[in-house]
Amino acid sequence: MSDWRTNPRQGRSQFLPLLDEIKKRLTLGETIKMIFESYPELKMSYPQFTRYIKKYCVDESKLVAHETGSRKSVNNIESMVVPPVEAGRKLVKNPADLKKLRNQSIDLEELRNSLGDKNESSDS
């Protein structure tokens, strides 16, 4: 393996001229991997490319996360809203609270009745 200190460090100087085009492609929904693979002339690794994307593009663009199921995409952690704790539910703050919660008995009939409208029974 070659010594990284002897290799010329030209990644940023190759990345910055392409920045506007990369931002446009990100806003159109292309994945970072697709964009990286379309520039074989870049002499940088994929992890370095993603670091430059995070540094120069994330704050300004809306990245489209390709996720499965009902998960929602989140642009940054600051935009996440923590829902308030519902009445009757306990907030777990530490491992001791979690252990107490695990040791409690659960009334399955009450749980079934609390999961929505009583007219929407799955038994019928």
Image: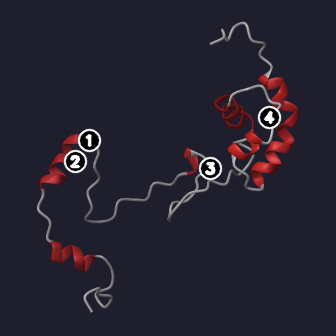
Q: Give the residue number, with chain letter if any, for mark 4.
A: 40
**From the image, which quarter does the C terminus lie in?**
bottom left
Left or right of 67 on screen, residue 61: right
- Whether residue 28 is situated above or below residue 115 in the rendered picture: above
Tag 3 secondary structure: loop
For residue 98, which numbered disc appears in the image?
2
Indicate the position of residue 82 as horizontal and vertical percent values: 45, 54
- Whether residue 106 is situated above or below residue 65 in the rendered picture: below
At 17% from the left edge and 53% from the top edge, which residue is drawn? 102
Q: Which is nearer the N-term, disc 4 or disc 2?
A: 4
Instruction: Say if mark 4 contacts mark 2, CB within 8 Å.
Output: no
For residue 66, which numbered disc appears in the image?
none
Q: Amino acid at mark 1?
A: Asn
Indicate the position of residue 79 as horizontal and vertical percent values: 58, 50
Say few, some or many: other residues with alpha carbon within 10 Å of mark 1 (under 14 / 14 to 19 / 20 or more).
few
Extreme front residue here? Answer: 1
Q: Which is nearer the N-term, disc 1 or disc 3?
A: 3
Say which quarter of the image contains residue 67: bottom right
Instruction: Say if mark 2 contacts mark 1, CB within 8 Å.
Output: yes
Q: Give the residue number, with chain letter if any, for mark 1.
A: 94
Give how far apart the Cα atoms at labels 3 and 2 are. 30 Å
Left or right of 56 on screen, residue 85: left
Q: Which is nearer the N-term, disc 3 or disc 2?
A: 3
Indicate the position of residue 5 as horizontal and vertical percent values: 69, 8
Q: Give the residue number, with chain letter if any, for mark 3.
A: 75
Indicate the position of residue 76 as horizontal and vertical percent values: 60, 46
